Structures are given as C-alpha cells and as structure tokens.
Amino acid sequence: MAVIAIAQLMIVLDATIVNIALPSAQRDLGISDGNRQWVITAYTLAFGGLLLLGGRIGDLFGRKRTFTVGLLGFALASAIGGAAVDPGMLFAARALQGAFGAVLAPSALSLLSNTFADPRERSTAFGIYGAIAGGGAAIGLISGGLLTEYLDWRWCLYVNVPIAVAAALAAFYLLRRDHIEKSHRVKLDLRGAVLGCGGLLTIVYGTSEASSRGWSDSLVLGCLLGGAALLTLFALVERRTAHALLPTHIVGNRNRGGAALSVGLAVIGMFGLFLFLTYYLQVVKHYSPVRAGVSFLPMTAAIVLSSTGIAARLMTRVPTRNLIVPGLLLAACGMAWLTQMKVDSPWAGMVLPAEILLGAGMGLVFMPSMSLATLGVARHEVGAASATLNTAQQVGGSIGTALLNTIAASATTAYLVTRNAADPFIRARGAVHGYAVATTVAVGILLLAAVIAFLVVDHRPGPGGAADAEGAESTARAIA
C-alpha cells in the first residue's frame, strides 16, 4: 500500500508542483510568455493522451513490471527536466514525464485492485488512494512553494528522483510477481492505440490551447472536432476487435461508466478551484507562494478525513450512490460559497469554509468511484479499466482548466470595459468578478455530475459488508 500510495502521490502532485515554480523557471531559461504554457501542457498532453495505451501495456506485460519501469522512467525524465539548459529540453522532459506517468498510473490502480481483494481491506486501501488523488494536487502547490522559495525551481523536478527510485526498489522486492508469459499474451490493438490515443491527444491539446486562443479559434475547434471524430471511429473499431485496447463492456457497465463520468466532471470543478484560488491568494491578496500553498491544507485534510474516515467505513454498508451524490452536492455547496468572494474577503470567513466543504465532498466522490472503476473486471482487463478512470480525471482537468479560465477572463474583460481599468483596485475587483462567474459555472457542473451519478450508479454492497456478486467474482480472480 505504501509503495502504491507514494507512486500515486508523485503522479498527482507533479501536475501542480511546477505551477508555482513556473515564473522562476521562465526567468531562468528565458521562456517566452507565449511558450510558458508548454511546461504544463507538455505533461498533461502526453499523460492524458497515452493513458489508454499505458493501461493496456500493464495488462499485456504485467503490472509489477510496468509499474517499476514507469517509476524509473519518471525519475529519469525528472532529472532531465531539473537539469534543463533551455526551454526545449524542459518541454521534452515534461512530455517524457507524462508518457511514463501514463504507464505508471493505471498500473498503480490495477495493483491496488488486485492486491486488496477482501471488501474491508479494499475499502480502506481505496480510501487512502482516493485521499491521495484528491489531496495530492494541493500538496503539490505547497511543495512547489516551499522548494521554489527556499531552494530552487529545479528541485520541483529533482525531488521526484529519490522518491521514484526508492519506490521502484521497494516495488521490485515487495510487490507480488505477475509476469505474463509470451504464450499467454494477447495481441496489442495497434489500430485502437492510434485512434484512441490520437483522439485523446487531439482533444487535450485543443482544450489546452483554448486558454490562450479562445474556444472559437479555428485550431481549437478543429482539434476538438477532430478528436471527437477519432474517438467515434475508435469506438466503432473496438466493437469489432477481438483484443480491444478498451473493451466496450468496461465503459458500457453503468456503474463503471457512471463513476468515470462523475470523477471527470468533479475534476473540472476542482481544477478550476485550484486555478482561481491560487491567483486570488497570490495576485489579489498578495500571499507568498508558501503561504498560498499552506492555505490549501484544510482542503487536503478534509479530503483525507472524508475518504478514510467516512467513505472507507460506509462503502461496504451503503449503496455507492449514497456516497457519491452527497459528496458532489457538498462540493457544489463549497463552490457556491466562493461565488460571494470579494477583494477584501477574509480567508477564514470565505476561503476556509469553502475548502472544507469541497474537500469533504471530494473525499466521498473519489474513493468509491475509484473502487467501482475496477470492481468486477477480469484480471487481464484491470489495466484498461484503471486507465479509463485516469483518462476521465486527466481530460476533465484539462477541459476544466481551459473552460473555466476562458470564462473567467471573458467575464473580467466585460467588467472592466465600462470602468477605470487603470485603477489597481478596480482591476482586482474585475479579476474576482471573473472568478465568481467561472465558479458559478463550476457549481452547475458539479450539480450535473450529482444528477448523473444519481440516475446511473446503482451498485449496492452485498450482505455482511461483502461486495456484490460482481465483486465476489473479482475477488476470486484476484486470489487465483
């Protein structure tokens, strides 16, 4: 559990740890304003686009092997990024990090699902995993602030090296061998890999460009429509492929599909919160990077307590829908609280209650959704199921960042048109107005996720706290 948790934490926090270090890296390497987004986009593009392929590789060659290779590759890419001497080298290293992360993340979730078969152990393990998935991004902001302020921005990348190497060594000695012999390996679905990964890469790239170009830009629209077309073709091809990259019955199951949709929509709102609160605290309230990062700690604590203290205890006793739906409604309440944010709002009276509500809600969403994602899946398909949930998270994060950032920027511009934009206080009010408008949209997205979860997810635990028949079948496979 410790090995898997460390790997997952490294993946999640790396998506945000570089954010606070970005201004320092930009000055040091001479990155232009137009190209600085690629420090973030290169990682999310490779990670989100290659997840389906990474999950299937784990199914074909064994999760322990791909998990270990993913860790060592992530360490190598981090070292290259930390030693970058020009923008191109840093961009390439971040893309390499994303590629190895796409191999590592599904393997980690697959190992978790196959290792912890007992329903009670499974609920505890997924409670820890869900807490990391929800709180890791906030920990990344804190770590990025500390490393940048007291050491150097390069340590935001170097810090991964000893962690990944230590985790790889521990994985080699502690994790159960699950090597798959060549005679038992199924053929890799290359057509599906090209179509599925190509479609995801195109959509993630389009949404990342929307932040700077706008949603009506021809390149953005072309990428979104092209990506949708590739994924449509991918779905048609997979229905006729014997050894599909993503077997249709995985996403066709209402519980797994509902869990992926719920997580994807929840992450849209969550990433929007990180984005706006980071700017609000540092630009409007003039917090230092460290103080801004520490300000996210209550939300992280709420996620951990909610996942491990509430969701893990109730998962084997109540219908999963009774955790996910209230969790999404709590998160929506936290977002709604932030719509009242003003320039001079106190942190304790405005930001803190919202963080606690959102954290408590997300803890109830992530943990049971991640458990549902792999429940009842054949052992040789757990990687593909894991990759599906990770893909929903990554694509949701990319879309959320681009969509909500564009909405906030447009609302701020409209606010300043009829006012004195030269006045710093008016500019600050305009920025906060933009955040409030985008946060209102995030509330709507979270409410939509709650409706979908209520209508689609219908999983119930079996008598005595055991999983249902589907879960029992999965347990038997894991033991075998």
Image (tube, grey):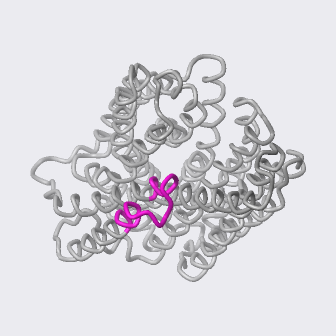
Residue 447 placed where, x, y %? 66, 73
Magenta-drawn segment = 207-224
| Residue 152: x %, y % from top left | 57, 18
- Which of the pair 262/295 is nearer the observer? 295
**Residue 260 rendering spot, x and y as whole percentages:** 48, 66
Residue 139's spot in the image, x, y percent?
A: 63, 37
As for residue 219 lying within the magenta part, the answer is yes
The C terminus lies in which quarter of the figure?
A: bottom left
Q: Residue at x 52, y 63 (%)?
A: 264
In this view of the protein, can residue 312 be seen by the observer? no
Q: How many marks?
A: 0
Q: Nearer the viewer, residue 71 or 290?
A: 290
Q: Residue at x 36, y 55 (%)?
A: 479
Question: Could you tell me which residue is drawn at 63 percent across and 45 percent down?
Answer: 135
Quadrant of the rendered structure where residue 137 is? top right
Residue at far bottom of view: 455
Magenta-colored segment: predominant secondary structure: helix
Corner quadrant of residue 448? bottom right
327 lies left or right of 218: right
Q: Is residue 58 above or below residue 407?
A: above
